[in-house]
Amino acid sequence: MAKTKTTYFCQNCGYESAKWLGKCPSCNEWNTFVEEIATKTGVRAPDWRTATGTAKRTSRAAAIHEIVHAEEMRIVTPDGELNRVLGGGIVPGSLVLIGGEPGIGKSTLLLQLALNIPGTKTLYISGEESEQQLKMRAERLSQASKAECYILTETATQHIFKQIEVLAPQLIVIDSIQTLHSVHIDAAPGSVSQVRECTAELLRFAKETAIPVLIIGHITKDGAIAGPKVLEHMVDTVLQFEGDRHHAYRILRSVKNRFGSASELGIYEMQGTGLREVSNPSEILLSQREDRMSGIAIAAMLEGMRPMLIEVQALVSNSAYGTPQRSSTGFDTRRMNMLLAVLEKRFGFRLSAQDVFLNIAGGLRVEDPAIDLAVITAIISSQQDIPVATTETFAGEVGLSGEIRAVNRIEQRIAEAEKLGFGTIYISKYNTRGLDAGKYGIRVKPVAKVEEVFQAIFG
């Protein structure tokens, strides 16, 4: 009887150990090791060619000056938001991992993509749904008649590679990586070793055949992609699909991208017929209100290369308890506390005994420091109960001494504010060097200190 090799894997980073350890020496996490049967004795190393019978490709070392650089030939999809996040389209031979919460729309996004790419034979491999379920979803997306999209319900990688050899697709979608298993690893699907080995087989297949593979990955309760951390290092691109299932808008965020910017953002609206691209996110991030209300300021932010105007909402009220509350949604709470300390220390606003709540409208999570000026303006507007004019917007970082620091790509922010019909934009005076404000149809007001902004708005 053949013996089996038992080993222990860290569920967080994939570190392998011959015995159980309380603390992982790689990622320093506690109680993350699980026992798994790693490899059957006498079975050769897993390889996708064992299923297809393809001959192994040999390679040789080449001097860097001999290598001819050529532009990457990308598969441009009909989905403009996905093209933006990927850096211009899908690169042949790339491995793309998409993670997100259950029910957020990952399968809908990729099935919609597989049905809509013209002239591309796509293979959608599902280990979670039957063919009838996928057919029903395709009919709901009104794209069930596309002839070049094939459905395969299979979880064994060896059978999958045989079908790929027969069909010869140009694009492959895996839904999901946690359902696949390889016969070379005697462990349950979704375990650390199975996820790692199945991904390694798909990676070798994609690189040697130049066929792109899109993979759906489950996430843990902490929001991280389930499986070993090495999974994110193996793939070329990691995308995060975010949003609240109680709201219509979804955000596709690039976390890692070897072929483009890792800070791009795509926005979709979930409808009954699928996901609709939102080409102008500024319109959905600004509420349509008729009356002027206090505690609201508009910030000109930048997400990757994309300028957007977002609405910052603040509420300041007297604290009913001994300890005032500090809560923010979509904005770093520690940074909000820093801005509150600046307002109290430098400008004398007594906020230490008041509750402060901050919200970024539209469910967006913002890390751009250029919205600092809009945040403090919204907070003071709420405390003083003085509304900010709906034609004014802000772009500036606030320092600890109350100065307004310059931000990058100010021209794009100004142009976006002008396009949406705003009349005035407050920027740092250090952004005016080399800036031709006369070419814009919006009033550009440079300021150096926060006092100047408060004087202009609140008097």
Image (tube, grey):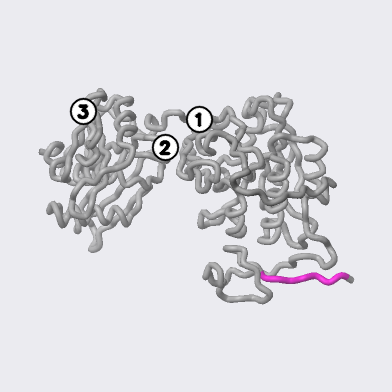
Q: Which residue is mark 3?
A: 443
Quadrant assignment for the N terminus: bottom right
Left or right of 87 on screen, residue 45: right
Residue at 26%, 52% in the rendered image:
356
Give the CA distance from mark 3 to mark 2. Answer: 23 Å
Q: Is residue 6 magenta?
A: yes
Q: Determine the residue located farthest toward the left in the rendered image.
A: 459
Q: What kind of residue is marked 3?
A: Arg
Which kind of residue does numbered mark 1 sit on? Answer: Glu
Indicate the secondary structure of the residue bearing disc 2: loop
- Determine if the magenta segment contains residue 431: no
Label placed on residue 277: 1
Query: What residue appears at the point 85 percent right and 66 percent down from the top-left corner?
Result: 42
Name the residue carrying label 2.
305
Q: Quadrant of the C terminus?
A: top left
Instruction: Name the chief secondary structure element in magenta.
Output: strand
| Residue 248 in sight here | no
- Identify the disc placed on residue 407: none
**Residue appearing at x 21%, y 46% in the figure:** 404
Where residue 306 appears, x then y in whole percent? 41, 35
Q: Position of residue 247 (x, y in %)?
A: 46, 39
Which one is nearer the viewer's eye here, 268 or 419? 419
- Binning the other alpha carbons within 10 Å of mark 2 as few (below 14), some (14 to 19) or many (20 upward) gives few
- Residue at 55% x, 45% y: name it: 258
Task: Please report the bounds of the magenta region as a residue range.
Answer: 2-8
- Give, as a three-letter code, the residue at label 2: Met
List x then y, in percent, for residue 230.
60, 58
Q: Nearer the viewer, residue 116 or 263?
A: 263
